[in-house]
Image: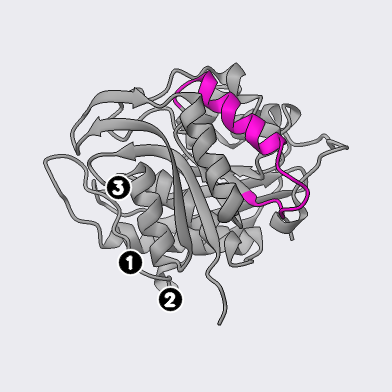
Amino acid sequence: MMSVPVVWTIAGSDSGGGAGIQADLHTFRSLNVHGCSVITTITAQNSVETTGLFPLAADAIRQQLECLQQDMPSAAIKIGLLSNMQQLQCVADFLKQWPDTIPKPCIVWDPVVVSTQQDRLSELLPEHCTELLPLVDIITPNLEELSWLSGVEVIDENSMCRAAEKLFHAGLTQILITGTELGHSDEISDYYLSADEHIQYIQQKLETKHSHGTGCTLSSAIAAALAHDYPLEDAITVANAYVHQGLIEAKGIGRGPGPVAHTHWPQKIKHFQGLKRRSCPALTSSFPGWTRNPDCIR
């Protein structure tokens, strides 16, 4: 009997159930992986607002990580909310010390800073994040998070590429920039960028306000697909289709934006996005010496 891949989520708990750990575990179950959780922060949150943030101490996070590693090592890890520098340093130190006897997992980081309700969730500063960038395989920021991380105001494709290049110089190897419009009011695009690749994933824009947890769901779906040995480009394709069908079926729960629906493996062609391979003039450097995880780049 084939074993089920194990995927960890290192993230905050959303008491409203729409994002964070809760969205990740729903996604993992939908995509047939066993989800384990390392909680970084407890939030008092509903569909309208976040009224409380209770970050765990770094030692509590470290013990969760070490306990899982001893018995349930992961094929992939999704990282979400890290509330402060102490938490980020704890996760970075743990990843740096990953033992050679255990295969290194694919690591997806969704750099959450602000909630769907526009509540600030993290005390991190952009300069803190440079500690973690070289240790992950891909990050999945939206435009606001990309601007914050890079210090570049992203207003078009050229500034998006310049922002990505700054992060590449800080040690990042791959990025998926999510939920962009950039002049196309009827389309939503995700842009995958690396030193030698630029792919635009294009979906028709859906008219719905029920999109709580889209970033968490997308990044955890990528991690789940990677755990099933999908090549990264295919993992992004599957994850994007999973989110798209979840947005189509999403319903309101509470007075604010409802959560993405958690359904099943995407199978209908209408849920899959169009792809364009693009050139990115701002990415002109060759970045020798990168140490990517070869299992996550095919």
Tell me if mark 2 has few (under 14), some (14-19) or many (20+) residues whose alpha carbon lies within 10 angstroms of its own: few
Left or right side of 244 for 158: right
> Is residue 102 magenta-colored?
yes
- What colour scheme was applied to this rendering of the protein? one colour
Q: Nearer the viewer, mark 1 or mark 3?
A: 1
Q: Which label belongs to residue 276?
A: none
Gap in angstroms between the C-alphas marked 1 and 3:
14 Å
Tell me: residue 57, above or below residue 254: above
Tell me if mark 1 has few (under 14), some (14-19) or many (20+) residues whose alpha carbon lies within 10 angstroms of its own: some
Q: Nearer the viewer, mark 2 or mark 1?
A: 1
Gap in angstroms between the C-alphas marked 2 and 3:
21 Å
> Is residue 121 magenta-colored?
no
Task: State which region is magenta.
Answer: 83-106
Question: Nearer the N terminus, badge 2 or badge 3?
Answer: 3
Q: In the rendering, at what x and y percent does residue 248 appear?
A: 29, 61
Question: Nearer the N terminus, badge 1 or badge 3?
Answer: 3
Q: Nearer the viewer, residue 225 or 67?
A: 67
Q: Residue under circle 2?
A: 267
Q: Which label belongs to residue 263?
A: 1
Q: Amino acid at mark 3?
A: Ser
Q: Residue under circle 3?
A: 211
Left or right side of 118 for 284: right
Q: Nearer the viewer, residue 41 or 272?
A: 41
The local secondary structure at tag 3 comes to loop
